[in-house]
Amino acid sequence: MPGRPYDYTCVRVRGDSMWPVLADGDIAAIDHSESLRSDLAAIKQLNKRIVAFRVDGGITLKWLIYKEEESLVLGLPENKAEIDTTIILRGDQINQGIVGLVRWWWSRR
């Protein structure tokens, strides 16, 4: 792991909401140090990147889209057939809902 390895957690992808970028069975490395900075500049740096979000006692990986004019963070799936898995965060939910940045992933495809 680059930098500080204890800032990372690797998870196995389950589901197909991020298909074809991430597939069921892929391994993703989440950098938790990115979630420690909750200021506006940090959120802007995560814009249009794959991020781990807290949801229902677990996590989900989605594209983070930051809507500055509405102070809104969206977590959007790559697979538009899974659009019902969209994450919507406002205010304090933003800081609590972001687990970290997906730095890299591995796939057997």
Image (cartoon, rainbow, N blue to C red):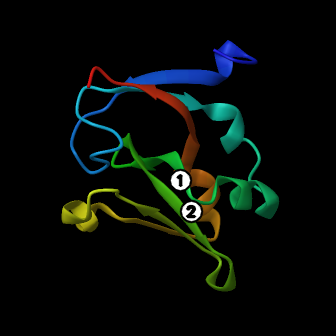
Q: Residue 32: horizontal and vertical position, in percent?
A: 63, 33
Labels 2 & 1 near each other (Cβ < 8 A): yes
Q: Secondary structure at mark 2?
A: helix
Percent position of residue 33, x then y:
71, 33
Going 60% across and 61% down the picture, which residue do you hit?
94
Q: Please state if 64 lies on the left or on the right of 44 as rendered.
A: left
Q: Is residue 104 above or below residue 94?
A: above
Q: Quadrant of residue 65?
A: bottom right
Q: Quadrant of the C terminus?
A: top left
Name the amino acid, label 2: Gln
Q: Name the residue at the front extreme.
A: 109
Give the left or right position of residue 99, taking residue 83 as reference: right
Q: Which residue is mark 2?
A: 93
Q: CA distance from mark 2 to mark 1?
A: 6 Å
The residue located at (56%, 62%) in the rendering is 93
The amino acid type of the residue labelled 1 equals Gly
Q: Secondary structure at mark 1?
A: helix
Q: Which residue is mark 1?
A: 97
Circle 2: is it few (<14), some (14-19), or many (20+) Cα within 10 Å? few
Q: Is residue 2 left or right of 56 when viewed as pictured?
A: right
Quarter holding residue 100 = top right
Q: Residue at x 81, y 59 (%)?
A: 41
Q: How far across and down, in percent of the image, does residue 54 sit?
A: 45, 47
Using a 10 Å C-alpha cutoff, classify the residue at mark 1 as few (fewer than 14 neighbours), some (14 to 19) or many (20 or more): some
Residue 14 in the image: x percent, y percent? 24, 35
Compared with 67, 84 (above or below) is: above
Say which quadrant the N terminus sits in: top right
Instruction: Name the residue nearer the viewer: 105 or 40.
Output: 105
